[in-house]
Image (cartoon, rainbow, N blue to C red):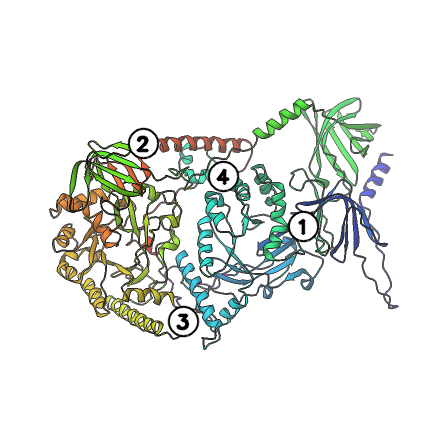
Amino acid sequence: MKKLFFLLFFLSLSQIKAQDYFPTDKGVKTKDNKSFAFKNATIYITPTEVIKNGTLLIKDGKVVAVGKSVKIPKGTHTVDVSGKTIYPSFIDIYTDFGIAKPKRPSGGGFGGNQYAATRSGYYWNDHIRPETNPIDEFKFDSKKAKAMINAGFGVVNTHLHDGIIRGNGLLVALNPNSNNAYRILDDNSAQFLSFNKSRKSRQLYPGSRMGAMALLRQVYLDADWYAKGNMDNKDMSLEALNKNKNLVQIFETGNWLDATRADKVGDEFGIQYTIVGSGDEYERVNDIKNLNANFIIPINFSKAYDVSNPLLAQQISLRDMRKWNQEPSNLSVLSKNGVNFALTTHNLKSVKSFHKNLQKAIKYGFDKEKALAALTTIPANIIGNSTIGNLKVGSHANFIITSGDIFDPKTIMYENWVQGDKNVINDMNIRDITGDYMLSVNNKNYDLSIKGKGAKQTGTIKIGDKKVKSKFSFKDDWIAITLNEETGYTRMMGKVINASNVMQGTAFDSSDNETSWSASKKVKKEDSKKKKDSKKKKDANIPEVLPVSYPNLGFGNYTQPETETILVKNVTVWTSEDAGILKNTDVLLKEGKIEKIGKNLSSRRATVIDGTGKHLTAGIVDEHSHIAASAINEWAQNSSAEVTIEDVVDPTDINIYRNISGGTTSAQILHGSANPIGGRSAILKLKWGENAQGMIYENTPKFIKFALGENVKQSRSPNGTRFPQTRMGVEQMFTDYFTRAKEYDALKKSGKPYRKDIEMEVIAEILNKERFISCHSYVQSEINMLMKVAEKFNFNVNTFTHILEGYKVADKMAEHGVGGSTFSDWWAYKYEVNDAIPFNAAIMHNAGVTVAINSDDREMSRRLNQEAAKTMKYGGMSELDAWKTVTINPAKLLHIDDRVGSIKEGKDADVVLWSHHPMSIYAKVEKTIIEGKVFFDRQEDLKKREAITQEKSKLINMMLKEKLGGAPTKAPMKRKDRNFECDTLEELKN
């Protein structure tokens, strides 16, 4: 009897549905009936248009009717989906689905020698590839399609992730039952861009973010020139770029800063990019909002760090700890700030983690309706296709059938129909029997707990707190349970009855005795008080998200400083003007300016600071710095005049805060010294917490970095093959570029048509005395050479920086009118510096040269006050002249002395309050004020240090709790720290 029962049971599990076949030899042909009606469902036509107990009618892959009273034609397959929910299938508009990642050519590496493009008939730079057509490489990936379908996706937009301009995209339906002719909804869906170079070429340029931005600008200019018929040669890249210009332009970025940089380039050419974000937009959401761009946002959240080892935990920066805590709130923050965005699986290691991450984002406050829109209607609108992402009449029959709320972790996703073809994820006919039951068999009661989804529902059995060894299976509505106890085993078979609340069947013990068994679901009664308590508990489980600061790291500001009226009383004032040093003097700062200097000043609404025994100076100006930039060198060409540091200002650099803590308020951020003609400068006010644009001087003077010597001729680079290779070649290069720029400028001024060349525009500005040169220099012969080249082309070099042999040619420098920005006492750190002496600054000063002391170093830039003092020891400069080397003199060299560099009525209120004599080693900055705003306050700094300690402790406890809760963690990584020094090989690689 028992054997017969088991045989019938297993036969029932292996039944195969019969299929009808029709003869074709008599000319009779059949066509599948692709008309289906889904009745009694909750239907989301769009995220905001929902029908209860509705019917969805589809035919031949399209929606033909949807509503409460839909007439179902004869012959239609009708499916009763009572209690179930139908959603439009999801859309991912940023993937590489079906397109293989390109391989790099062999050889090359840093210092490699591929400077020219490898292709003819295309643009001069291999990384510009708008002609790329992914359909040539597309191969439907059935395995990946299945994973995407199981996650609810029905359509993807794909392209070749390769290059700065990457070509067009394909909009593909994930229909494994079709062919490409039917699957591909649009073979020219968008144009894709990024800041990343092509893997198919080892062409070195561009070698930096600012180089990529400059290249994009030049491409757009050239495309316009080409479109007007001004080029003799055919260029397939420019033709493709012009052809694709009306497509949606999708730009991949790596962080929120890059998002603002991409948008900046687009705005210059009237292009509104759709930006692929990175998940850190919450850090600067107002800046992101102001871009007015559509976004595509990945949801790839960080794991908690394993902080169980206190020593390793100390290595984790507060910024990285905050990222783990704040990242899941990104979608909620963007949504609440009105940023329009779609979601993507981009950068996920496995599509399976998509829903888990999305559910986490919802737990952190992301609205479910907005989540559905971000997966359906919004990506459809971005890509410009109204037939996907909704279930309106005429749209593609792409929809998901679920057991309920699609974003609920307990919901079962049954089927995902794509173009009217069914894809089964979980058998819709399998009951959901999850819950807690009282199992009764052999006069004993057990606790049965069933969890899981669909065919993967599993059961565990206990008596009291003791787990019973058992096996459980559920298939085709049959339940099989085996209990293995010390007294023997019991095998049970049965079915579910009474709406999944009761199970019953037949059991056999180890002696083959037959009996019955049953299991009844335990019904939990919850009164109103318990419901309230449950709600409170749920609210209490909402994760705590720590507040964002600006920038979002230790010592950041939670609120930005505001302009104050400040009166400093009875202080020693170092004017850096002819007035010299004023004792027991008052200074009034009002509306961001120095209002008055004198004695016994008063102002009714001013914040009064007692300056007795203290010193007030102008903010220090650093003529030569490399802080606060995401890139320093565009090293891949011998001239990079087309690039600008303004494109890559990084307002999150902690060295900004360290600089203002040392009294530095303004700095010229220079390009590096990798090439003779470098990039343009950024002159900044170090306004800690403001965005990049807010730090750049308004109406900033135009500067560019030139360089001489070992660095530019690549004497220390083992693979250097780029011209010039000698100091003679450097001179010839300058002459050549200035000659070309002169010819270019003449053509431009003639009124005749000309191809706009950003590089030549910049160099022509030098010839027209509209842009100033700050030149890296050491050896006197080269210093003389550049002055002679400049005089030949009728302009002056503005500043020689480093200028460690300036003392040898100080008279010639004074005659030429060039300033010197030098180190106080650096020498012999490389061969061409062997003749440097610490008396250099004083000798140049005595010869009539405007002399500044600069840092070229992120650490030295916060103690330039002490560097200035060394000029008194080496050369006997006066106290006031020494102080001018870090205030008014560098301001003069940067042509900002009308605004900063001294304490004078009418100038910007950029001042520093010192505890002692400003050049004393005991002097500490008490306040750093820029335009009347207090950006550094020592007392607030002490509070910030304590707050950082407390916040790190709190985050460590959160991470420990995460680990104890069983969540995966990752090992701490050591922080990478390095200096940006002009003469290091490390910097040449930047």
Say what amino acid the circle numbered 2 marks: Gln
Residue 248 x %, y %: 56, 59
- Badge nearest the viewer, 3 or 1: 3
Q: Nearer the viewer, residue 360 or 519?
A: 360
Identified by mark 1, the residue type is: Ser
First-in-chain label (4 vs 3): 4
Residue 66 vs residue 716: left or right?
right
Using the image as rendered, state which of residue 14 and residue 56 is in the foreground. Answer: 56
Residue 758 vertical position relative to residue 3 in the rendered view, above or below: below
- Determine crowd level at label 2: few under 14, some 14-19, many 20+ residues with C-alpha closer than 10 A: few
Q: Which residue carries the number 1 mark?
A: 89
- Magenta stretch prevailing secondary structure: loop
Cα–Cα span, label 3 and label 1: 48 Å
Whole-number angstrom distance, CA of label 4 to CA of label 3: 48 Å
Between the residue at mark 1 and the residue at mark 2, the CA separation in whole angstroms equals: 56 Å
Give x and y (percent) for residue 828: 20, 52
Q: Residue 106 colored magenta? A: yes
* Kind of residue sitting beneath label 3: Arg
